[in-house]
Amino acid sequence: MMALANPHELDLSRVDLVTMRRRHVRQVMRIEAQVYPRPWSSALFLQEIVRRADRIYLAARYEGDVVGYGGLITSGLEAHITTIAVDPAYHRTGVGTKLMIGLLDAAIDRGARTLSLEVRRSNYAAQNMYEKFGFRPVGLRPGYYVETGEDAIVMWVDQTDGPEYAELLNRMRHKLASRGRRENAGG
Ligand SMILES: CC(C)(COP(=O)(O)OP(=O)(O)OC[C@H]1O[C@@H](n2cnc3c(N)ncnc32)[C@H](O)[C@@H]1OP(=O)(O)O)[C@@H](O)C(=O)NCCC(=O)NCCS
């Protein structure tokens, strides 16, 4: 795939979110290998995406290429984000935010009221993004990441079925839309 000369020119309205399918996994693996020290295997993605009853996996596509993806496990009133990643050539262009909105909408639609995740202690980029979606640190799993021995911070947001959270998601949607308009206007 071709990276944009200036990724900030990315027209977010042309990034579409689709259910991750088998045919996306090769491109997902290419991103996975770049962003994680211990990438998931393609077999694991393939196992996950067929579990339609209790998993939601989305791929973000731009001009036919997968530029990001994310997934979660749903279980009754709870959901747990298992992964989210964006192609490094597209970092900081809003793709991660778009994926989070898609995942949260889908989880809430399935009845999730509480969402959790683990994030590396040193991963401030992801922590910043999660905080914008109301996630707060609630615990620590010491040495959770076996390859580096790094701690995981457990983050959590609840009452996602309430009006305040719907308002937060709407604000995030508007922010993304206005960002797209600004960039299209050459700003
Ligand atoms: C985390 C990740 C998915 C974010 O994707 P992205 O497309 O760059 O995210 P966005 O452009 O939507 O940015 C959303 C917010 O995240 C935060 N953020 C993203 N990158 C950041 C960085 N390098 N430094 C600080 N904050 C950052 C900012 O708050 C940003 O909002 P802003 O641009 O309005 O300031 C991406 O950095 C990634 O793929 N990282 C590697 C994989 C990973 O760590 N996944 C999370 C595992 S828990």
Image: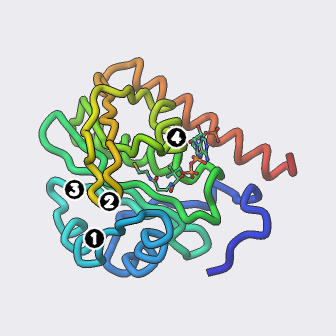
- The total of numbered circles placed on residues is 4
Disc nearer the start of the sequence (4/2): 2
The picture quadrant where one finds residue 108 is top left
Q: Are marks 2 and 1 in contact (CB under 8 Å)?
A: yes
Disc nearer the start of the sequence (2/1): 1
Q: Residue 124 carries which label?
A: 4
Residue under the point 38% across and 60% down: 58
Q: At numbered mark 3, what does the secondary structure look like: helix, strand or loop?
A: strand
C-alpha separation, residue under disc 4 versus residue under disc 2: 23 Å
Q: Is residue 140 left or right of residue 32?
A: left
Q: Which amino acid does label 3 sit on?
A: Arg
Q: Which of marks 4 and 3 is in front?
A: 4
Residue under the point 34% across and 37% down: 153
x and y percentages locating residue 76 in the rendered image: 12, 38
Instruction: Specify few, some or many for label 3: CA neighbours under 10 Å numbering under 14, 14-19, or 20 or more.
Output: some
| Residue at numbered disc 2 | 57
Pointer 4 residue Cβ closer than 8 Å to ligand 1: yes
x and y percentages locating residue 99 in the rendered image: 47, 51
Q: What residue type is labelled 4?
A: Tyr
Q: Is residue 6 positioned above or below 139 on the image?
A: below
Q: At numbered mark 1, what does the secondary structure look like: helix, strand or loop?
A: helix
The picture quadrant where one finds residue 104 is top left
Q: Is residue 173 left or right of residue 82?
A: right
Q: What residue type is labelled 1?
A: Phe
Q: Residue 55 carries which label?
A: 3
x and y percentages locating residue 139 in the rendered image: 27, 29
Q: Which mark is residue 45?
A: 1
Q: Which amino acid does label 2 sit on?
A: Tyr
Instruction: Specify few, some or many for label 1: CA neighbours under 10 Å numbering under 14, 14-19, or 20 or more.
Output: some
Q: Which of marks 4 and 2 is in front?
A: 4
